[in-house]
Amino acid sequence: MSKIKRFFSKKKEEAAFKMRLGGGMGQGHKLNEPKPDAPSSSSSKRDKDAYIPPRRNELSNEARAAANAALSRIERKDSKDFNTSLAAIKAQAKRELEAERKQKQELSCSSTTGSASASSSAQENRNLACQGVFFRCPLISDEVLPKQAWKQKIKEFLYQQLEFERGLTACLIIQNCNVKERADDCIATLTKYLENIIQHPNEEKFCKIRMSNKIFSDKVRYVDGALDVLHAAGFNEVELDGEPFLVWSSDQMEPGLDLATLLDALKNSEPIQLELDRNIKVLLPSQARRVVLPDDFYRISPEEIKREQQMRAEAIESSQILKTKAMREREEQRTLRMYRYSLIRVKFPNGLYIQGTFNVYEKISDIFEFVQSCLADESLEFNLVSASDGKFSEDDMEKTLYDCKLIPNIVLLFSVPSIPTPVAVDVNFLKEDLFMLVQPM
């Protein structure tokens, strides 16, 4: 089965499943909903539901050599050698912290020279907590790319598939290669054309479309994928009385495709969904000081971000004015709505951090899944603690990051109830292969 047919087949299965849930199968529940009889624990998922990190692109020769070297260090049989590597990481962190303090002292004693704008830009790039927001698209490939790169790649993929599945692919092109309003208007118009032919196949007025017609010109003719749908349906361009028309004939339909199938695909097509990649990173303590977020995390443009920052500066100046609780809550909500994504960091007792990117409407249970997938022992029961709200409970699992105000970035503390803190400091909780993700300075 082709990827395009697999896409529509999956949509039909999802629709049938929803119909069954709404029928006689009783009250539905979400797949990631914690079981009501589960024991009180901060870990809402078990091995079978654990978050599975995506398969990455194939490594280059240089990266593979570096990875093999790291693995060889990690996989030494003598546990003392492995503990030494952890100690080396901690020692490196201490040296970096000391170097940072000295650098700050030197900067405070010296005057700034050179190009202010260039140094400011370079410093900002160095302080970025991550390089952007990345996505996966299992329908097309295993690559991990920014959203804009995926938009171009999806368009290229769909146009390549036109040769094999013209009608079904064209339905997806309409949804994925045009702005939503234009795609919706086009689909509504094409749906009417096809329904008229299905219901009145012998009426001549429904079997031809004058290409100079205003509705056709405004809503169909110049929309990506629209003419391919009509050609697959059996329309051919001909000239009648010196004017271009599209004339339908059942003999001209795409082989193996009928109008009812094409109409169903047209009605059920939708944008190909991207899956947010966690972009996992393992950080040393000094690297966790980088908190500047790239523009991808915001709902608004860089120019709007600057205006918002200016408004905040003005708000600080007027902060002496007494504000009601409602006024403060409105300002807080306005700030939260600026962000589309949140950067979550989890600090372990040994000083290391793991970092992942989340949508602000993902749930607290998704954070626990993410942390669980990174643990050497995924069955370990653990707590995540917020500095402001304390330990998360089972009742918090269905709340979103937005609900809990874990935006735009937050550090959560990892703890294990069964291991005392003094002992946990010397325990490595992370999977060994994650040490390859320790970020270079």
Image: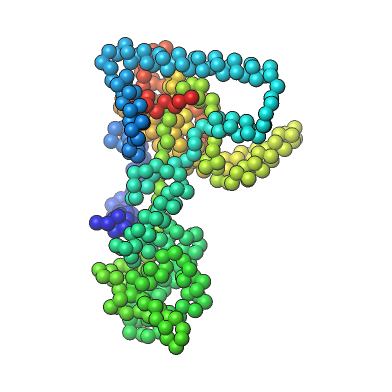
Identify the residue shown where x is 45% and y is 37%: 357
Identify the residue shown where x is 35% and y is 35%: 60
Residue 377 location, quadrant:
top left
Q: In this orientation, which residue lies closer to the viewer: 357 or 165?
A: 165
Identify the residue shown where x is 53% and y is 32%: 128
Residue 257 location, quadrant:
bottom left
User: Residue 364's spot in the image, x, y percent?
Assistant: 44, 35
Q: Viewed as shown, does residue 304 lie left or right of 37?
A: right
Q: Viewed as shown, does residue 139 lie left or right of 181?
A: left
Q: How is the image coloured?
A: rainbow
**From the viewer's perspective, is residue 153 above or below residue 269?**
above
User: Residue 318's spot in the image, x, y percent?
Assistant: 74, 36
Can you see residue 199?
no
User: Residue 199's spot in the image, x, y percent?
Assistant: 34, 78
Which quadrant is home to the N terminus?
bottom left
**From the viewer's perspective, is residue 91 above or below residue 48?**
above
User: Residue 393's spot in the image, x, y percent?
Assistant: 43, 30
Residue 352 location, quadrant:
top left
